[in-house]
Image (tube, coloured by chain):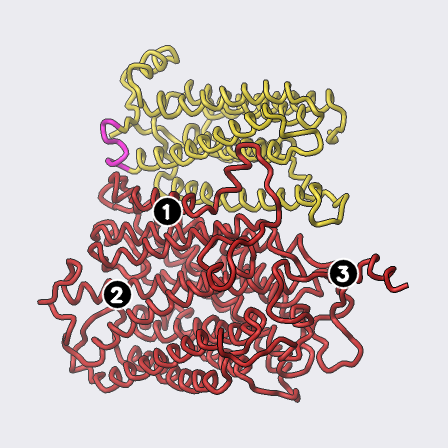
Amino acid sequence: MSHSQNKSAALMQGVIIAIYLAILTLLEYFVAVAFDAVPLLIVVAIIKAVLVVYYFMHIYKLNQKDSDTNHESYAYKTITNRLGLWLFLISDGFVFAGLLVMRINLLGLTRPELNQTLGLVVTVVLLLSSFFMNRGEMQMAHGDVKGFMRNTAITFILGLGFLLGVVMIEWRGVPAIAEPILHFFGEPEGMKALTPSSGDASTGPLGAVFFMMTGMHAFHVLTGLIFLFVVWNNARKGVYTAEKHWGVEAAAVYWHFIDLVWIFFYPALYLIGTAVGAP
Amino acid sequence: MLGALFGAVSFLVGCGVTDDWIKWARGIDTSDHHEEHWHGWEKFLNVSFDHKVIGIQYTLIALLLLGVGGTFAMIFRTELAASQLQFLTTDLNLFGQTGPQLFNTLMSLHGMIMIVSILLGISGIINYAVPLLIGAADMSFPRLNAFSYWISVPAAITLVSSLFLGGFDTGWTGYPPLSARAPVGMQMFFMGVFIAGWSSILGALNVIVTALRMRAKGMTAMKMPIFVWASIATSIISMTATQFIGLAFQLVMFQRLFGMGFFDPAKGGNPVLFQHLFWFYSHPAVYVFILPGLGVISELLPVFVRKPLFGYRWVAMSSFGIALVGFVVWAHHMFTSGMNEYLRVPFMYSTLLVSVPTGVKFFSWVATMWKGRISTPTPMLFVLGGIVVFFMGGLSGPPHATVSTDLHLHDTYFVVGHFHDTIFGGFVFPFFAAIYYWFPKATGRRMNEFWGKVHFWLMTPSFFILTFGMMYVGLLGMRRRIADYDPALGLDSAHLILTIAGFAIFTSVIIFGINLFYSIKHGEKAEGNIWNSRSPEWQVPSPMAAHNYSKPLEVIGEPYDYGLKDAPYTRFIEPASAGKSKH
């Protein structure tokens, strides 16, 4: 698929990539349930990552030639900003790489016992938010501010859903809300789930690693949500046009980066190895 | 700790660094070129987006921290002058610490304050010089640049505050489990380094983008000054690897605050993991310290030798060679840490491999000087001093890299001697050279030559005595990081000489400081190209105007063709309207 200039083709491309990602995520889930195949999970995660980096984050734009050689022009500055943003993401990626190193070192081929259905649901929610973000950015690139605002609002709601899903339900942050939902998702009887309130963060490596990794990711989701609100608000004020919307692109690329991190964290925390209950 | 974080953020918002960003978030556009409200020395105490002002601010805070760290060193060096405890005794109680505990705190803080000072010092030189060398009006992201500078102020305050909050005993490395149990001063230490890390990461990012995007017309990669190459290489390291030390320190902070047992074996954690994460940054970090310094040497040497730089391409690539090899050598700090034994030999060889790109640089410097017309004003003296000192540092390196000898040398003063040799040769000498060299560009006056030479001739011999003495006592069994030693070692007189040499260096730096501040107002006027350099910034009068070059630059030659006639490096593009007005 080539990257198209046509609006409906660009939106269609987003749909196709989202379907690919959904299929791969389900494949991942069933592979983990059916066999114990770590290499396959790694391969699937890398394929998903490549799709996101190319079709959602548009990494090829880094290779764009300058149409305007004046260093003060908006076009030249956008390419400069894009390079800066990518360098920042590479730098930030090292934090998450370090967390993965820590997880491998401390947990090896074990993982915490977690509610699998909930994990799949929040993953799909985050993936969907990425899809809508891409849709919004494509609409802004073709000058459709209304469409952009609509899609960004959906992205924001889905992102908030992911954040609450992790912090409130997965962490059992608010038991009164978490318990009925977890029951609805079919929590097995006697599952020893990690709860910070019972001190699981400080009793063993399972809780420490799990809360550190999801916590660091949740912090990035939170900053991404703030960023999304800022660009949505600016779009409402009419700051962006089809030609000048660097802020929108930056917010979108950052949001996809958060998704990219979760593509690796999801198998690392939910799928790889054998589950060990909380102590 | 939350207080420190909150304080840092509110400091930044309060002093106005983030004003423009807040406006952008509210959808207000801001102008690219700010009018400066402040003149004279006041502009250095206020937020400015001009890379030259920020570069000087960085350099000043680096010198300030150098003074603080040096003072700490003098205090504990005095205690070490003789065996037994003299004034840091167990009866002493200062800031809630006994004498030996205070020794540990000062020793640990000396390490980390000097490292932060070096990071800020290289940022200072890079910020000042890189946009000038590539012919740009400013850095790519001036607001981010101001942010990176101003965040280093609360970082430095937080770091020094650990002295008054109970101190800590761990040395600058902060290994758990000791660091997980130390007093609250440890927390401030981690927090200060963590905040300084932001400054380093964001500054490095800015440098790479600037060097890639803001170059003058015609400046292809192979026509960039060597210092720009070195800055890019050093920035690649600090932009990526710094995240690992930040993460490692954050994990220890969480272990202290929430009891999460990342590095606590009793809770299934692994202390060696901390050392891996820590050294994955902290070894490449020493290349962050030295690469800009070696770049300064390569940049200045041809100016004072009047000959082209030998092997330009190889020197440019060698910086990248050092940076890349530097990523795969970290575990040579851990030969005695109980990591897997089969990892030792690969890390030994990768470490020895560092000497290859470094050797390329030495070969180029010697070949550049060969049969040149060498003149020795103060900057050149420091360049030559840097080469010799760094050579000594380089030669004392392989004994540490080799597993069999390192097992004996580990944690002795030999390591301390080696480290000071490399950092003085790779950073301190070139840093002083750069200040003496670019001072006229910044102020329009030059520093006093006589006192500059006194500074050099006092510092260099004392420094040799100091580091060779450290290696000597280390080989005879002196452990590092201890307040007292056994008189039976027979090292009392050696330590006394070391202390005297230390004070001589301290005095020479004070002379430098007085010279620096005196020359700002009273130095000899130097508005032209006093070093007879080919570099573009010397082709315009000093001090530099606010947005650098009034006319755009074009590169038409090679950067280091000294001694060749009619081979200029750059020329100014005359505006078309000026051409018309002549007719």
Q: Dot 2 corresponds to which residue?
A: B106
Q: Share a chain, discs 2 and 1?
A: yes
Q: Return the chain for callout 1.
A: B
Q: Residue B412: name its quadrant.
A: bottom left
Q: Return the chain for callout 3.
A: B
* Distance of label 3 from label 2 (alpha carbons): 51 Å
Q: Share a chain, discs 1 and 3?
A: yes
Task: Tell me which segment is drawn in magenta.
Answer: A197-204
For the residue labelled by badge 3, is the local secondary structure a helix, a strand or a loop? loop
Task: In the picture, one chain is red; tell me its letter.
Answer: B
Circle number at residue B8: 1
Q: Where is residue A122 in the image (x, y as percent from the top left)?
A: 45, 22
For the residue labelled by badge 1, is the local secondary structure a helix, a strand or a loop? helix
Callout 1, which amino acid?
A: Ala
**Relative to residue B349, is residue B231 drawn left or right?**
right
Task: In the picture, one chain is yellow; tell me its letter.
Answer: A
